[in-house]
Amino acid sequence: MIPPVTLFFLAPVIAELLSGSAPPAEFFRPIGLAVLTILYGGGAILVREITIRWKKGWISLLVLGAAYGVIEEGLMVKSFFDPNWTDLGILGTYGRWLGVNWVWSIELTLYHAVISIAIPISIVELIFANRRNDAWVGKTGLIIISVLFIADVAFGYFLLTTYRPGAVTYYLTVLVIIALVLIAWRLPRHAFAPKAVIIRHPFWFWLTGLLGTVFFFLIFWGLPTTVLHPSLTIIIGIGLVTLIGWTVTRISGSGAARTEMHRFALVAGLLTPFILLTPIHELDATRPDNTTGMTLVGLAMLVFLLWLWWWVRRNSANA
């Protein structure tokens, strides 16, 4: 039970606490902590268990992670449609069309697929590498998690916001979720496998992750301040994510060439900008919320990643 419990609590820490979306004063409130943990932790467990049971690969996992993002932001909090959602900023007007915040919607879907779902799963699988290909939750546990997750989404729908999108918009959102799940189910396990056997130093994986995160936020929050049309911002953003996936595939080689250290380096690179931003969150006087403790959050994550580096390196040496 240790791997799923670890994932259950790690997912909200990365998605909400480390990102600064929910600083310590907000994150550790009992009700808020319960809602976020069931939402992110339950969602991450469900995505991983479905991927394992369907015998799919990382592409299907990311697509299921995207479906999770649509559930959270489209069905639960409805930020995809609410023009007055707290975190929108300029994206409440930039890219809004037919009642949908399109740039925000694409950004959050990609964010949740990678940061909220794929990274926590990858980290826990690095810790428990000997159980990477095993199901971590039985049928009864899966049912319980599913019920809690659905109840959490319903709680958020009715109590977290009063905004209600039109019925047609909501039905279309459900169809998008179903389509993403079906796509994940139909995708082959080894989609986009590299042809050449070549492996790069883990540093290049770290750098790819670092630059990927930096440019992701520059695109989705920098370009909206320019005269660039929102559709081009969306295309560039999706293109960046595709490029990152292609780059990782090209430098990974094939077969067993990619090691656990390479996986760790990619995850560490993706999280590095979040760690570097934690002091800025705490010093940002323009934020209306209490950001005290964010620097400690960043330091704690840095220490955790250093421990994970040692753990993965030790296990790789003993393999």
Image: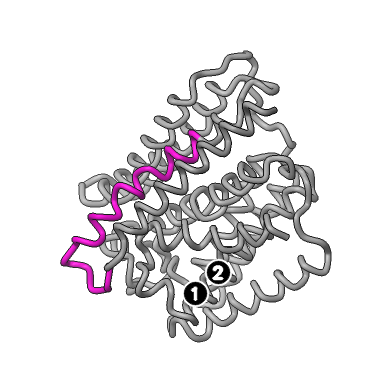
Question: Please, is residue 241 above or below residue 303 in the view?
Answer: above
Judged left or right of residue 208, residue 122 is right
Q: Which residue is mark 2?
A: 37
| Amino acid type at image mark 1 | Leu
Q: Residue at x 29, y 63 (%)?
A: 93
Q: Position of residue 74 (x, y in %)?
A: 51, 67
Majority SS type along the magenta span? helix
* Residue 269 highlighted magenta (yes or no): yes
Residue occupied by mark 1: 33
Q: SS of the residue at dot 2?
A: helix
Residue 176 visible? The answer is: no
What residue range appears in magenta? Answer: 265-291
Real-space Cα separation, disc 2 to disc 1, in angstroms: 6 Å
Quarter-of-image position of residue 56: top right
Left or right of 27 on screen, residue 218: left
**Residue displayed at 78% across by 43% down:** 55
Above-or-below relation of 213 to 48: above
Residue 302 in the figure: left or right of residue 251:
left
Q: Position of residue 169 (x, y in %)?
A: 53, 70
Determine whether label 2 and label 1 are within 8 Å by CB. yes
Residue at image point 46% right, 52% down: 111
